[in-house]
Image (spheres, helix red, strand yellow):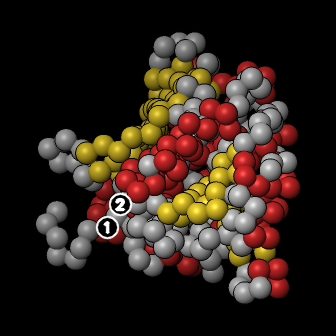
Amino acid sequence: MSSSSATPAALSVNASSERLVARLIDDAARLHVDVTRTEGGTVIVDAGVNAQGSAEAGVLIARICMGGLGRVARRFALDAQPLWPGFIEVHTSNPVIACLASQYAGWSLSATKEQTGGKKFFSLGSGPARALACKEPLFDELGYRDRHDRGALVMEVDRLPPQVVIDKVLGDCGLAPQNLVIAVTPTQSVAGTVQVVARVVEVALHKTHVLGVDLGEIVEGSGSAPLPPPAPDGIQAMGRTNDAILYGGRVHLTVKSDAVAKRLAAELPSSNARDYGRPFAEIFTSFNYDFYQIDPALFAPAEVWVSSLESGATYHGGKVDQPLLDAQWKAAGAAP
């Protein structure tokens, strides 16, 4: 890929998201999140473990996840027969850096039970602090590294991080303890559901990368996905957020060349995958909870439009599967 055109080094995802992080902390009471500090001064924002959290907190955390380089909004569907009442809408004019260098949940953070003094811990980190640590091979491919003295990380996990994991993040990011903010958003929470569904464009960018398409081709990215209520069971909650994108997500990308537009319209949608057509929780369970057994082609939006700046043409592929979403999300006996 052409890293220079895809990821401008002058953009700092941590600097761009600082004001959003400050708002999350300052508006904690209104957003129903709890803010605490470790002994070293690291700020922990609980958006759904012990705190109630909120959809508004989820939107703000999703914007932080995108390094302040994307718009995220919660919308109410006004169609006569909407796919679902609530939607998350996302747009970014810096799709590669916002989605892959910041929002993508690619930083594996774990600790043994001996290290925690209790039970083992595992979470995938997302958000702008990833670009300070650059622990993932993806950053070498993107040719991007952020340099800033403050950072924010989001963890999608159902417990607050132990100190050993916080210390690892501080060390890898080169941050003073008081200059790190960690937001925790369990998938079973309202905020967690919002921030995962807000990855609809990021999922399209990651699939584009998996397909081997030059990321420098991607100029703009927009998308929407239905916002389901969280399920109390962790696996079912994860299933709902994935189904929202895989079977209900719609994405519009603007690319430079006609050949790339045609290819992405044909190959990007989730319907190309071997495992397509079943609820994600069912697929995940059938592979003994091993993500790596699932066909990676499944992790994509349901429907895509790709516009070419070269020709002015827009190509379309995939479709939304409303019956599958209705079967998973509506109560038994509910009206169609």
Answer left or right for 37 relative to 52: right
Name the residue rendered at 79%, 43% in the picture: 132
Q: What residue sits 56% from the left and 36% below the top?
A: 19
Secondary structure, mark 1, is: helix
Residue located 71% across and 58% down the image = 41
Is 323 situated left or right of 188 in this image? left
Image x and y of residue 252, in percent: 47, 32
Q: Quadrant of residue 53?
A: bottom left
Label whose residue precedes the other's in the sequence (2 or 1): 2
* Three-letter residue code for mark 1: Trp
Residue 156 appears anywhere in the view: no
Q: Considering depth in this image, is 152 or 227 the residue closer to the camera?
A: 152
Where in the figure is residue 5, as x and y percent of width and height? 73, 21
Q: Residue at x 61, y 18 (%)?
A: 256
- Residue toward you, 219 or 92: 92
Q: Is 76 above or below relative to 45?
A: above
Identify residue for label 1.
329
Q: Residue 147: x, y in percent?
A: 80, 35
Gap between marks 2 and 1 measured at Cα: 7 Å
Mark whose residue sits in front, 2 or 1 = 2
Q: Are marks 2 and 1 in contact (CB under 8 Å)?
A: yes
Q: Which mark is residue 228?
A: 2
Does the image show residue 65? Answer: yes
